[in-house]
């Protein structure tokens, strides 16, 4: 699996867009980018995933650069409930998710 | 919305005792997993289970661990002789097919405390 690099922590003001970066410079052509989050010791929660096109769902948007070496998860209007650890995972496996350390996102009131 | 459930939410046991952690995956799912998270650390993969057998296990999943799907609805993790270092949150997860088409659902976890 390709390695990812995420900042250990970030702050975002409530109501603003939270942009979480992820570098995956060694990604290969068949590897997908997944984002999960974990709210304070709860079970991880799936957010979104993509291969090369930008993706959007009711929770977030995923922007993948053209060279696929980095991506950004966007939470359009962050709320206090979005305070969590966000995991960027890159894998070709379609049967297992392996978590790294993630980014601890603090939403500030 | 469908959900994975786990019982108990908190289990306290003495070192050397056996524990069984229980999970009820989402009913039409085919792939089942156990992960653990030691306090303050990352979520670690333990084992995956498909078609009534282990499909993959990590080096953490040694002979002290076993999994079972005894009745077609429950999925259990047994730790035969618990150690202090087994204290952690244990998460069960399931999904219905290939990850690129289906999200993986996680349960709320069981906090295991070994004294």
Image (cartoon, rainbow, N blue to C red):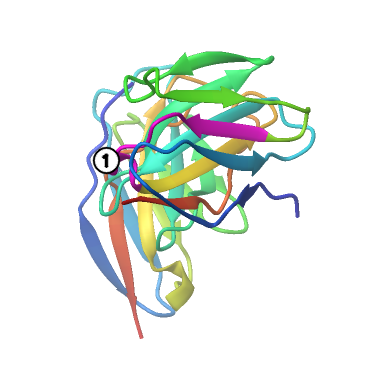
The one of B85 and B14 positioned closer to us in this rendering? B14
The one of A40 and A13 positioned closer to us in this rendering? A40
Chain of the residue displaying label 1: B
Residue A95 visible here = no
* In magenta segment, residue B81: yes
Horizontal side, residue A105 vs residue A37: left or right: left
Image x and y of residue B109, in percent? 51, 51
Badge 1 local density, few (<14 within 10 Å), some, or many (20+)? few
Q: In the structure shown, which secondary structural element does the residue marked by tag 1 occupy?
A: helix
Q: Which residue is drawn at the image coordinates 29% and 59% (left, top)?
A: A104
Kindly indicate the quadrant of the structure image that contains residue A11.
bottom left
Q: Which residue is drawn at the image coordinates 51% and 31% (left, top)?
A: B78
Image x and y of residue A36, in percent? 46, 47
Horizontal side, residue B45 vs residue A48: left or right: left
**Placement of A90 over or under A103, stated as above or below:** above
Q: Quadrant of the C terminus of chain A?
A: bottom left
Q: Quadrant of the N terminus of chain A?
A: top left
Q: Which residue is drawn at the image coordinates 36% and 37% (left, top)?
A: A99
Kindly indicate the quadrant of the structure image that contains residue A103.
bottom left
Horizontal side, residue A30 vs residue B16: left or right: right
Horizontal side, residue B104 vs residue B17: left or right: right
How many marks the image carries: the answer is 1
Image x and y of residue A14, in percent? 40, 80
**Placement of B2 over or under A92, stated as above or below:** below
Residue A22 visible here = yes
The one of B50 and B98 positioned closer to us in this rendering? B50
Give the residue at mark 1.
B85
Q: Which residue is drawn at the image coordinates 46% and 44% (left, top)?
A: B90
The one of A45 and A61 positioned closer to us in this rendering? A45
* In magenta segment, residue B20: no
Magenta range:
B75-87
Image x and y of residue B82, in percent? 37, 36
């Amino acid at each position: 699996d390709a390695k990812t690099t995420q900042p250990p922590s970030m702050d975002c003001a409530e109501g603003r867009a939270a942009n979480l970066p992820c570098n995956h410079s060694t990604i290969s052509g068949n590897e997908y980018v997944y984002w999960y989050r974990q709210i304070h010791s709860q079970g991880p929660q799936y957010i979104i995933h993509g291969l090369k096109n930008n993706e959007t769902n009711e929770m977030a948007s995923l922007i993948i650069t053209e060279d696929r070496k980095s991506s950004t998860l966007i939470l359009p209007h962050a709320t206090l409930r979005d305070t969590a650890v966000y995991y960027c995972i890159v894998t070709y496996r379609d049967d297992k998710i392996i978590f790294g350390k993630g980014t601890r996102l603090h939403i500030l009131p | 919305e469908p959900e994975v459930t786990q019982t108990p939410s908190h289990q306290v046991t003495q070192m050397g005792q056996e524990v069984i952690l229980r999970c009820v995956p989402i009913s039409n799912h085919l792939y089942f997993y156990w992960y653990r998270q030691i306090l303050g650390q990352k979520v670690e993969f333990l084992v995956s289970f498909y078609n009534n057998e282990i499909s993959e296990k990590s080096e953490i999943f040694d002979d002290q661990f076993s999994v079972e799907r005894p009745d077609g609805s429950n999925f259990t993790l047994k730790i035969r002789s618990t150690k202090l270092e087994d204290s952690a949150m244990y998460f069960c997860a399931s999904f219905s097919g290939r990850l690129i088409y289906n999200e993986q659902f996680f349960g709320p976890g069981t906090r295991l405390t070994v004294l």
